[in-house]
Amino acid sequence: MNTTHLATLVAVAEAGSLSRVAQQRKTSISSISRQIAEIEQTLRTPLLLRTGRGVRLTPAGEGFVERARFLLRDLDLAIAEATALDHPQNHPLHLSSPIEVALSLLPSSLSLFHQAHPTVRLDIHAEARKVSLLEESYDAALRLGPLQDVNLLARPIGEVALFLCGPPSLRLQKPSIEAIGSLPYVGVVGTNEKVQAVLRQKTFDLSIRSTIRTSTFSEAAEFAVLSQHAVILPSYTASRFLHDQRLILLVPALKLPTIHLHMLLSPHHRKTLPLQTLYEILREQLAKHNTLSPKASRSNRSARR
């Protein structure tokens, strides 16, 4: 006895006819009859009574068919649930990301990701807090700065380059580290405190004269444009403002400390192929942002002239 035979018995009981089920399944009446006979032989009791108008269930058959319906229904549900877990479109990947990374680095990466995995759904949470992959339902998280989750697999995406930028009105006649001392500077706090920590660790001092508290690097860049202040920006934010020429590089040769960007993986999803693809794309996109485009370089040279 198998589930195919049970399904045949249920179909015959509902149709009241062997020939009708055989026609629906494009098989012979003898094949349908043989399947039901095997069930009756296993149970050692008749389940169907043949009549001039078709078939009807015996009392034993009525009870057995009712149980078989529940069994087949539960089996279908179990198969559907198990299959759903294997289909990426039915199991979205939950990714936590710092706000500015989600706004600046992820958009270009997501278009490439969906080309590689068009059916995979990504649920991205842009947030300032550090989520717990062990306690919350996240598959992965992007982290800037030093790591503290020693029990998680951390894969380095790369080192984020930092650039000193400012509006064209702040261009220096002789760009140098010494000339920076005459510039007003905006020290960005909030989610960008990681950058401040890196600068302090490297004993890098740019004579901070004013401070703005903001949630994203983009807001700090907009503030720099409006207030004519200098600002340190990560590559993925600086490249956007340099491209549209609202900001320029004040000291292109200045080597600022870098800040690390990692992808943390949940223990349950360390080998997920879509996450591996996203990781590789992020590495490539970050490398591109770290290298300023020719257009940005030309705009900075013309601004200095």
Image (cartoon, rainbow, N blue to C red):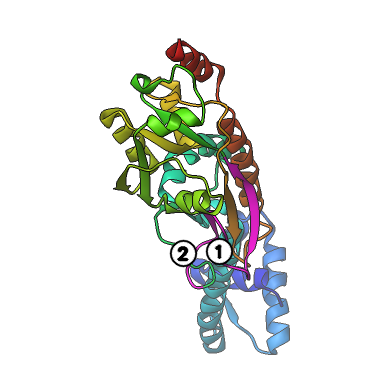
- The label nearer to you, 2 versus 1, is 2
Q: Quadrant of residue 244?
A: top left
* Residue at 68% across, 56% down: 27
> Looking at numbered disc 2 in the image, what kind of residue is underneath it?
Val
Query: What secondary structure is marked by label 1?
Result: helix
Residue 210 visible in rendering: yes
Tell me the crowding category of disc 1: few under 14, some 14 to 19, or many 20 or more residues within 10 angstroms, Cα based: few
Percent of width and height locating residue 128: 39, 56
Query: Which mark identifies residue 221?
Result: none
Residue 144 in picture, x, y percent from top left = 52, 52
Q: Position of residue 175 (x, y in %)?
A: 49, 22
Residue shown at the point (66%, 60%) measured from the top left: 270
| Quarter placement of the C terminus | top left
Q: Secondary structure at mark 2?
A: loop
- Marks 2/1: CA–CA distance: 31 Å
- Report the residue marked by disc 1: 80
Residue 46 falls left or right of residue 137:
right
Instruction: Please name the amino acid that badge 1 sits on.
Output: Ala
Circles 2 and 1: CB atoms closer than 8 Å: no
In the image, farthest residue toward the left: 226
Q: Which residue is mark 2?
A: 131
Is the N terminus in the top left, top right, bottom left or bottom right quadrant? bottom right
Among the two numbered marks 2 and 1 on one chain, the one whose residue lies closer to the N terminus: 1
Q: Which of the 4 quarters of the picture holds residue 31?
A: bottom right
Front residue (pair 205, 137): 205
Magenta highlight range: 135-160
